[in-house]
Image (cartoon, grey):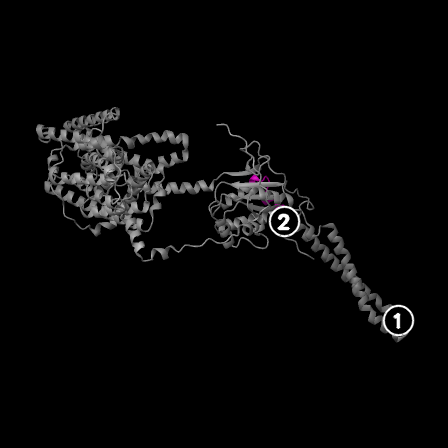
Amino acid sequence: MERRRRDYRVERQLLDQEQLEELGRWGPAPRTRWWRTSLQCSRARARALLLQHLPVVAWLPRYPVREWLLGDLLSGLSVAIMQLPQGLAYALLAGLPPVYGLYSSFYPVFIYFLFGTSRHISVGTFAVMSVMVGSVTEALVPDEAVNSTVNVTARDAHRVQVASSLSVLVGLFQVGLGLVHFGFVVTYLSEPLVRGYTTAAAVQVFVSQLKYVFGLQLNSFSGPLSLIYTLLDVCWKLRQSVVGAVVTAAVAGLVLVAVKLLNHKLKRHLPLPLPGELLTLIGATAISYGVGLQHRFGVDVVGSIPAGLVPPVAPSPQLFASLVGNAFAIAVVGFAIAISLGKIFALKHGYRVDSNQELVALGLSNLIGGVFQCFPVSCSMSRSLVQESAGGNTQVAGAVSSLFILIIILKLGELFQDLPKAVLAAIIIVNLKGMLLQFRDVCSLWRANRVDLLIWLVTFVATILLNLDLGLAVAVAFSLLLVVVRTQRPHYSVLGQIPDTDVYRDVAEYAEAREVPGVKVFRSSATVYFANADLYSDALKQRCGVDVDHLISRKKKLLRKQELKLKRLRRKAQKQAQKQAAASTGTSVPIDVNTSDGAIKSQDEDGPKAQQVSTEHELAEPAASGQEGAQAPDGCTLKSLGLSPPAFHSLVLDLGALSFVDTVCIKSLKNIFRDFREIEVEVYMAGCQAPVVAQLEAGHFFDSSITKQHLFASVHDAVLFALQHPRSGPVSPVLVTKL
């Protein structure tokens, strides 16, 4: 589309900050006392709090049954079909008996139905969360080389206690952060960081499932480099692999991949995708029961799955001290995954997700789930996509899936006792496809943004080498450090005017931009604060093309020499005056030998006055001649001292990028004013936002020498003012002593 030229003209007076405030009638914005409204007690306030913290009360009475119920039912059934095998598999990933994956697919899902604000995410077991839980349970309750069923049962019971206590602690963190409106903490987890972290977690998951794929008994490793040790242990014991387990996992994996490819090819013709995981689960259980995989081929199976729900159990407070660090990491990661996916669906379907309420909803899901012996959960990417694509409109789909899981727990769970663990491992590995494909981010980030690539790589390597908890801490610390480093090295530029406009751009980037004669305009792309204030000053002096510090140093030396010369002349004049006074006193004795007493009396009266006038006259002559030879202090300029003045008389600082100022920034700006005035350059500022001006006032930046008349509404205002008022000489000379 061809754009037509459109001209506009605005005629106005030059506006400095004082005139702008007067013209716009500036006044401080009224402060809202949030604590007053939060402490108000009224019926409307109570209703608003109820709708805010229990969203189901707001949307369920207005639920359009005819339009949405069928889609939610079909979507809930599809999610439940996926939830069943994933729940069993991810419990194994967490180091727990598979039935606890079913519990974690029921209680938290129903709690989120009541308190959540996203209509499309599927809450429940998730691979990343499960492997984080597994790293904790295996570290605190390691595997023991035992053959006794009693010891294995005791180990599993202890691990369940650890996982449920961890879930309660994760829930407490999330609820607490949500109630204090700390949902913004997820903003410190950038997308490259999250994707690098989940990719590393996928590698951790893949390695952790190799023991089930090959049927190996591995040593338990925890802490830094545990993944490397586990991988070496797998390679060392590869000869001990159980052939039946390898074949079972390979066949199950091929079937799952084939069904997924078939779903992709026929997605336009199928009303619902084929439940490949459920079909594989049922088929593998039937074959294992009929052939006897455990007894004949040594394939490890799930084992006893008790029917019915377990009673609530209080968490163990003694474990909290050893779980607090991992619990906080799991709480942040789980919330980050849930809120990022929830915002994607909210943007697509046109509704709003409350990040603080999401924290509360996830926290209550984990808190109440932990009481019923569930492990920490979040939302699953694959199930959320199925829930949305299958026609799900609200969390009614989640409630339907949880009820379906409840039926399986009560009646059908014991049918899967002969399910091979190798099949569950195959289900987990195949479902890692999406996260493992994130390795392609390396190529795309290399082309798009190499700083983000660095964050991705550091996060991935740190998580692989240091495990999931320390890896996350290193990744967040590195990304924040990188932000500080990037603000320390912003883009500095000297601006020139685009011809016939009031627009100023970098002269290095715009060929037509021309510097205004006599005026230098400088801009930084980042705010100025304690970490980069010195760098800002150094870059300013460098870009101006004048060695400011050297020029000031030479000026001070010359002025000091002039001062010493004046002092020597003064001492010389005083000595001459003293000699002349002594000589005049000595010659008056022989002259006064004359006539009468009256004449002698008259000479005695007039003598002191004559001596005083003579002395003052002699002192004045050398002083005047000394000031003639060296410039008078008030008229001292660089040119009179034999120094070359800068090629510009005014400096304009474009401060439009400043979002805040601190005391170091204020001192740095004052030093800039002082230094450039020493070399006969007047300094102006332009483009400050109102909050920045208020902070400058609070920091006592403005005084008699730097007023708001030095601050202009725009760069063009400052340039025009500088052209109309070129600086002619110094304001206050330094190191000059007046006689």
Q: Nearer the viewer, residue 196 or 583?
A: 196
Instruction: Judge whether 310 appears above or below 302 on screen.
Output: below
Kindly tell me whether residue 649 is visible in this rendering: no
Label 2 Cα crowd, 10 Å radius (few <14 / some 14-19 / many 20+): some
Element type at mark 1 = loop
Label 1 Cα crowd, 10 Å radius (few <14 / some 14-19 / many 20+): few
Element type at mark 2 = helix
Please state if 581 lies on the left or on the right of 523 as rendered: right
Where is residue 387? Give x, y as percent: 25, 35
Secondary structure predominantly adopted by residues drawn in magenta? helix
Corner quadrant of residue 578: bottom right
Looking at the picture, which amino acid does disc 2 mark?
Answer: Lys
Q: Nearer the viewer, residue 251 or 352?
A: 352
Residue 553: say if magenta.
Answer: yes
Kindly tell me whether residue 727 is visible in this rendering: yes
Residue ID for mark 1: 593
Instruction: Judge whether 445 appears above or below 315 on screen.
Output: above
Please state if 129 lies on the left or on the right of 663 as rendered: left
Residue ID for mark 2: 556
Looking at the picture, which amino acid does disc 1 mark?
Answer: Val
Residue 482: say if magenta.
Answer: no
In three-dimensional space, the C-alpha distance between marks 2 and 1, rounded to whole angstroms, equals 58 Å
Where is residue 462? Give x, y as percent: 33, 38
Q: Are marks 2 and 1 in contact (CB under 8 Å)?
A: no
Instruction: Judge whether 591 appears above or below 513 on screen.
Output: below
Q: Quadrant of the C terminus?
A: bottom right
Where is residue 55? Give x, y as percent: 27, 46
- Magenta-tinted stretch: 542-556
Q: Nearer the viewer, residue 341 or 444?
A: 341
